[in-house]
Image (cartoon, grey):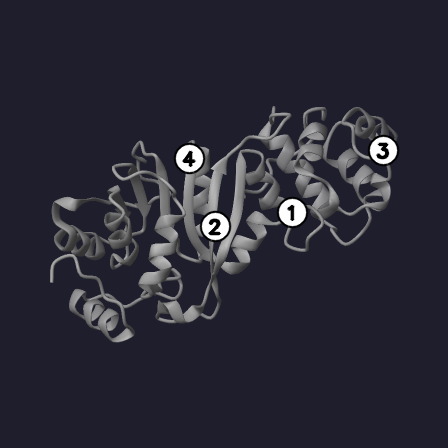
Amino acid sequence: MRGAVPSTPEEVASVLELLGIAPSRGLGQSFLIDPSVAAREAALLDLPPGSEVVEVGGGLGQLTHALVERGFRVTVIERDPKLAAYLSVNFGERVKVVEGDARTAQLPRTDAFVGNLPFSAGHEILGRLIDAGMEHGAFLLQKEVAERLSSPPGSRSYGRPTILFRTQGEFLMAGTVPSSAFHPMPAVQGALVVWGRDPIEPPVKDRARLELLLDASFAQRRKVLARTLPAALAYRFRLSVDEVPSLLEKAAWRTGWARRRAEEITPQEYVALANLLPAPRTATPRAR
């Protein structure tokens, strides 16, 4: 039936065989088969019918179907040409399908992005969407990645990616998804997250300096900052070790910073310090 989507492992395997597709574990290809998860994810967008929504990675259409059912005007970006053709035929005029990779393709204007992102590439895709100005989104990610992006200061998952994304907005966890909701079944659980753009204050003046600061801070995250940060900043920036405490005071870091660890510093504190740092001595920081 046109518009129907495979919802059991057997149905997914049958469609994939028909299309000549062998799921790649290297690319993190697992297909959602639980319609209740798709319905939950679509509902997280909390937008009125008729809203423009871009889905990243349509797969076999489980989430696409849920989005259409809520009355959204859906554009799907799908990198696999066989899956793109399948979605185009299956949904017809109800869905616009664009064949391309969300990491490089031109992104349409939209009210929100949504998607079941490949566990191997979810982090990179989210970075692209946020850098492109994404205001609102809902995503299914690997649980570990979702926890890292949404964790508060002081938690074990909090780190460099959390802070870089938090400068532009906030991810909130919206529930876990068991591995049994996918076929082939991945070795890890999934989780739903919601994104809302909400840049922190102060704004970042120089992204590269913030990234270098975070590299310096988290290089030895289990040690207190007094033992690592002054020397690391002196090495990476045009500073002496003795200048670091006065910079931290100007950046309004809380009293007792020396006894804290990198994961206990808030994004606002990191940005305030990065905005005061001089030009770096060295290299560009690593990517997200």
- Amino acid residing under circle 4: Met
Label 2 crowd bin: few (<14), some (14–19), many (20+), radius 10 Å: many
Label 4 crowd bin: few (<14), some (14–19), many (20+), radius 10 Å: many
**Residue for badge 3:** 241
Between the residue at mark 4 and the residue at mark 3, the CA separation in whole angstroms equals 39 Å
Label 2 or label 3, whichever lies nearer to me, is: 2
**Residue for badge 4:** 134
**Residue for badge 2:** 193
Residue at figure coordinates x 16%, y 51% from the top left: 91
Which of marks 4 and 2 precedes in the sequence?
4
Q: Is residue 6 above or below residue 265?
A: below
**Residue 86 image position (x, y, % from top left):** 17, 56
Which of marks 3 and 4 precedes in the sequence?
4
Q: Is residue 226 above or below residue 62?
A: above
Which of marks 1 and 2 precedes in the sequence?
1
Which of marks 1 and 3 precedes in the sequence?
1
Which of marks 3 and 2 precedes in the sequence?
2
Judge by depth and name the residue closer to the eye, 261 or 177: 177
**Residue for badge 1:** 152
Q: Inspect this view and state whether residue 121 appears.
A: no
Q: Secondary structure at mark 4?
A: loop
**Residue 169 image position (x, y, % from top left):** 53, 36
Judge by depth and name the residue closer to the eye, 43 or 116: 43
How many labels were placed on the picture?
Answer: 4
Q: Inspect this view and state whether residue 134 appears.
A: yes
Residue at figure coordinates x 53%, y 47% from the top left: 172
- Amino acid residing under circle 3: Val
